[in-house]
Amino acid sequence: MNLFKRNGQDNSRAEMSFIEHLDVLRGHLFKSAVAVAIGGVIMAIYNDFIVGKILMGPTHTTFPTYGVLCHISESLGLGDRLCMTHINVRMQSTAVGGQFGVYFNIILIGGFILAFPYVFWQFWKFTKPALTKKELRNTRGVIFWVSLLFFIGVLFGYFVIAPYTIHFFANFTLANGIENIWTITSYFNTLIPLILGAGLAFQLPLVMFFLAKIGVVSAQFLRKGRKYAIIIMLVLSGIITPPDMLSQIICTIPLMLLYEISILLCVKVEKQKKIEEEEEWG
C-alpha cells in the first residue's frame, strides 16, 4: 500500500518503491544532520559564553530567575521565602575525557535546539505527500506552532524548572560537614533533560489537536479525565522538581494551562467537523 497516493500532488512520489522512499528519507535526515552540525559550530564558536553564562547560569546567585522570585516574594509580603541567595556547590571533573564528553554533548544538543525548526521542517516535507489536500489545509502553520511551543518550553525549563532543581540539590545535605562537589557530567546530565523535557512537554496542545483531528480523543474525554490528568501532572512535577509544594505548583500550573488549551482546541476541531458534515449532507 502506498500512502503517498492519497495526496495527488506528487505523482512521482506516488510511484516510488519502499526502498526509494527510504532514500528520500535519508536525504531529509542528511539535511537535518547538516543543520544540526551548523548549529553545533555556532555553539562551539560561542562556547565560553554558552557554558559560563548560560548553562552554568543557574549555579550563580545573579541568575535572573532568582532576582525575580525574590522581588515577587517581597511584593507578596512573604519576606525572603522565595529568595535564593546561596548556592552551595562546587564543580569538578573526575574522568580523563569528562570535560570533552560534556563539550561534545553541548555542541550536539545545542545544535539540535538551534536547528529544531529546520529539522522539523524536513520531517514535515517527508510526511506531507501522505496527507490529503483537506488535511494539509487543517495543518497550515504547523511548523511555526511546533517550533514556537518548543522554544517556549525550553525557556520555561531553563528559567523556571532548572533553577529550582539546581538550587534545591545544591543546598541539600544529609548532615553538617558534607559538601556538595558535583561532577560537570552529572550537572549537565541533570540540566539538559529538564530543558529538553520541558520543550517536548509544551507540544501537548498540538498533539491533542492532531489526535482530535483523527478522532482518537475528544473534548468530552479530556474533560472527564481532567482530575486524573492533574494527578499525573503533579506526579511529573514532583519528579522533575525539588520535593516542595511551591516548586511543584510552579511547574504544574503551565501544564494545566496547556491541558485546558488542548480542550479548547478539541472543541474547535469538533465544531469544524460538525460544520463540514452539515455542508456535506447539504
Image (cartoon, helix red, strand yellow):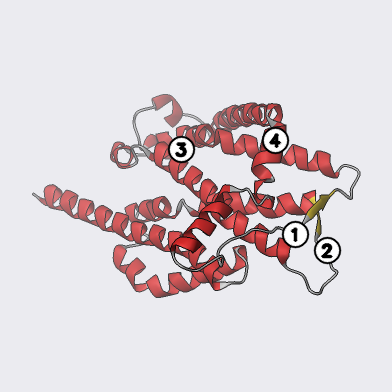
Amino acid type indicated by mark 1: Asn
What is the distance, in whole Å, between disc 2 and disc 3 at their CAs? 52 Å
Mark 3 or mark 4, earlier in chain: 4
Q: Are marks 2 and 1 in contact (CB under 8 Å)?
A: yes
- Judge by depth and name the residue closer to the eye, 1 or 26: 26
Quarter of the figure that contains the N terminus = top left
> Between disc 1 and disc 4, whose residue precedes?
1
Residue at image coords 28%, 40%: 134
Name the spot of residue 245 as percent of width and height, x first: 54, 72
Q: Could you give the CA–CA distance between mark 4 and mark 2, rounded to whole angstroms?
A: 30 Å
Q: Report helix, strand or loop for mark 3.
A: helix
Residue 75, by quadrant, is bottom left
**Crowd rating for badge 4 (residues with CA inside 10 Å; few <14, some 14–19, many 20+):** many
* Residue designated by label 1: 88
Q: Are marks 3 and 4 in contact (CB under 8 Å)?
A: no
Earlier residue among tags 2 and 1: 1
Distance in Å between CA atoms under marks 1 and 4: 28 Å
Whether residue 74 appears in this view of the structure is yes
- Whether residue 236 sits left or right of residue 224 in the image: it is right
Name the residue type under label 2: Glu
Q: Are marks 2 and 3 in contact (CB under 8 Å)?
A: no
The 10 Å Cα crowd at callout 1, few under 14, some 14 to 19, many 20 or more, is some
Mark-to-mark CA distance, 2 and 1: 8 Å
Foreground residue among 167 and 85: 85
In this view, the mark in front (2 or 3): 2
Q: Residues within 10 Å of mark 2 (few under 14, many from 20)?
A: some
Q: Which residue is mark 4?
A: 107
Distance from Cα at disc 3 to Cα at disc 4? 28 Å
